[in-house]
């Protein structure tokens, strides 16, 4: 068996901040969580869809970040939030022809 992750308040806060920084840097237009956008847009649209997608993105990034990395200090937690949230999404690049 593997050790269960420890979800402390500070682990959650710093990992969530890492996820929020990633979302804030790339934003909804450039960052597409694989299937989350499609599911959310099937049920709602507009600003509400953006808020729900943001919340799901942060929660999943935090759970996966703490669960896999098991950060023991704020720097590790921030990095976990950035890295694993980035792994759950892809940049929405548009190919332009020269």
Image (cartoon, helix red, strand yellow):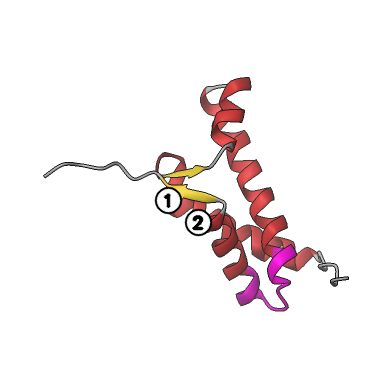
Residue 55, given in percent of the width and then of the height, sits at 64, 42
Given residues 17 and 2, the one toward you in this image is 2
Where disc 1 sits, the SS reads: helix
Residue 88 spot, x, y in % from top left: 57, 52
Is 57 covered by the magenta stretch? Answer: no
Circle 2: element type: helix
Q: Compared to 51, does 44 lie above or below?
A: above
Give the quarter of the figure containing the C terminus: top left
In-image side of 15 versus 7 (left or right):
left
User: Are the two marked residues, 1 and 2, in contact with CB atoms closer than 8 angstroms?
Assistant: yes
Residue drawn at the location 58% of the way across and 42% of the way down:
54
Residue 90 position (above or below residue 14): above
- Provide the residue span drawn in magenta: 66-77
Residue on which disc 1 sits: 26
- Cα distance between the residues tagged 1 and 2: 6 Å
Identify the image quadrant of residue 74.
Answer: bottom right
Q: Exactly how many numbered labels are in the figure?
A: 2
Callout 2: 10 Å neighbours few (<14), some, many (20+)? Answer: some
Q: Residue, x 63% and y 34% (percent of image)?
A: 52
Query: What residue is shown with label 2?
Result: 22
Quadrant containing the N terminus is bottom right
* Residue 73 among those drawn in magenta: yes
Q: Residue at x 52, y 49 (%)?
A: 89
Q: Residue at x 61, y 67 (%)?
A: 80
């Amino acid at each position: 068996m593997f050790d269960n992750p420890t979800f402390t308040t500070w682990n959650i806060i710093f990992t969530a901040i890492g996820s929020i920084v990633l979302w804030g840097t790339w934003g909804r237009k450039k960052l597409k969580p694989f299937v989350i956008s499609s599911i959310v847009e099937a049920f709602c649209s507009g600003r509400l869809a953006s808020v729900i997608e943001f919340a799901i993105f942060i929660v999943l990034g935090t759970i996966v970040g703490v669960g896999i990395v098991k950060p023991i200090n704020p720097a590790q937690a921030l990095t976990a939030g950035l890295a694993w949230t980035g792994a759950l999404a892809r940049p929405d690049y548009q190919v332009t022809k020269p």
